[in-house]
Image (cartoon, coloured by chain):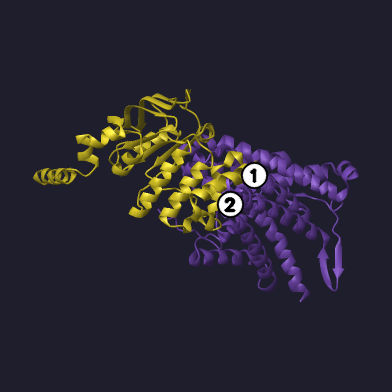
Chain colours: A yellow, B purple
Amino acid sequence: METLLKISDLHIYYGSIQALKGISLDVKKSEIVSVLGANGAGKSTLLRAISGLVPVHKGEILFREKTLKRRESYKIVIDGISHVPEGRHVFATLSVEENLNLGAFNRRGNQKLVSERKERAYDLFPILKQRKDQLAGTLSGGEQQMLAIGRGLMSDPELLLLDEPSLGLAPLLVKQIFKIIKEINERGIAILLVEQNARKALAISNRAYVLETGNVTISGSSSKLKDDKKVQEAYLGGTALKKQKNHFLLKSNI
Amino acid sequence: MSLVIEQLLNGLTIGSFYALIALGYSMVYGVMKLINFAHGDLFALGSYLGYTLLVMGTAYVTSILGIWGGMIAAMLVAAIGSGVMGLLVERIAYRPIYPTGRLPAVVSALGVSIFLQNAIMVVWGARPQAYTSDVIPSNILTIGGLRINILQIIILFLSFLLMGILYYIIQKTTFGAAIRACALDRETAALMGININLIIFFIFALGPALGGTAGVMVGVYYRRISFIMGWNYGLKAFTATILGGIGNIPGAMIGGLILGVLEMLGSTYISTPYKDVFVFLVLILVLIFRPRGILGEKVAEKV
């Protein structure tokens, strides 16, 4: 299958701290790829590098064989990558509809197209249609996440970057969000999904990468990773509890 | 009774000057979190540019365009001149030092203010200049005991028209939503495909353009202009911005109008020399009881 996004040997620094230490990763057309890892492993940094929010120190990011290095964020959106940031970041004092309109900012001249895309977003998230004149800041956490994803789809991307879409949501909503991610993917949009909820992420993705302190330690098909002992231990519960206990014991010894 | 109405009208006229200038402060602060202290002097520059066109080229300009046409032309020239200068100021004095933080930019803004003030003095002289009455005559209408200057009506009409257009752009169009989005969260705005530099260009051109237009209005209304006028009007307009809620566009308009009316009523009914005291007293009260200004209310963002 055609490769959409290809990252090779990516190095990112925040000041003198190295956040990514030579990561290689690719996303093929119509694929869901998960990136798993603990807090601070560099998952968000990876997405931020792709969408041009942090500068690339070394390595290469290719989208449809064109480099995204030193490309401005707003142009990357126009290229066909949409980034739904961690913590939703909806524009709180703008209405739901205005938030959606902004998602298609560079198509603002074409009212018909924007309306069509808005209808598509409302189909996916009917609650947003009911709330369209409400200020985004007054929505619940789950509704804000839906708005953030809906807004991300307004630019009609080929690749959707999702950063922790299930963060802080009730279990029932988490289930719904993952179902919708799958639905979006079935429309032919490739998804690069950063998640802490590894079980759910592996359940819907084709392939996955595990990030640890800026390195890819394990990668492969999701089904393979689900059975991987190390992944089970660290990210799928497994013996994680025991490990944590040991960790505390160690700490108290010190 | 007619005195009250006349004074209210006078207050609204001055208030619309403040409001037009305040819009520039508010837009720039909203997006850049920078108080553009040079803004008052860009207003003064507009006033002088209009003066140059109208007074120095009186015979020529008014013979072609008529008196009111000449006034509109002066406003256009002032708007363009101040707008271009606003862009230059952003480019030269602010953009290179954004990465160093907000405080250096404020100091730079103060520097630009002093520079512009002195540049105006060097070009047009230290003595006050006058928009002479042969340029813009004052026609006083008397309607049922009410004395109204036609100029006032024109000024009010034009400034409300400009404010209405700006309000429409900012509040009703997607481009305006993009400006508000940049003010809230620039990074996320970029992820929407919004070119921040386009927004910065827009606010630094349009804010001073409105200020420059107000500069011509002040000239034709009061006649007398001086190179330090930017300081006084700038301060009042800045107060209006705070009063209405800084960063809030309708707030800047309402703040300006309220300030003008307060100043006028205070000077008529209490004491003229103390008119500024009322203005700033109200500001202090608003800051104590409603620190975000009249419309500066924020919806809590749920995370």
Task: Determine which quarter of the picture holds residue B154.
Answer: bottom right
Q: From this viewpoint, is residue A238 visible?
A: yes
Look at 22% across and 34% down and name the residue there.
A228
Residue A176's place in the image compared with B254, above or below, is above
Residue B245's place in the image compared with A2, above or below, is below
Locate residue B99, reporting x and y percent: 46, 37
**Mark 2 belongs to chain:** B
Residue placed furthest toward the right: B63
Q: From this viewpoint, is residue B38 visible?
A: no
Count of numbered marks: 2
Look at 58% across and 41% down and name the residue there.
A105
Task: Determine which quarter of the picture holds residue B194.
Answer: top right
Locate residue B135, reporting x and y percent: 85, 50
Left/right placement of residue B275 relative to residue B29 reads right
Residue B299, label in figure: none
Task: Determine which quarter of the picture holds residue A196.
Answer: top left
The residue identified by callout 1 is A111
Left/right placement of residue B135 relative to residue A14 reads right
* Residue type of the residue flagged with mark 2: Ser
**Mark 1 belongs to chain:** A
The residue identified by callout 2 is B26
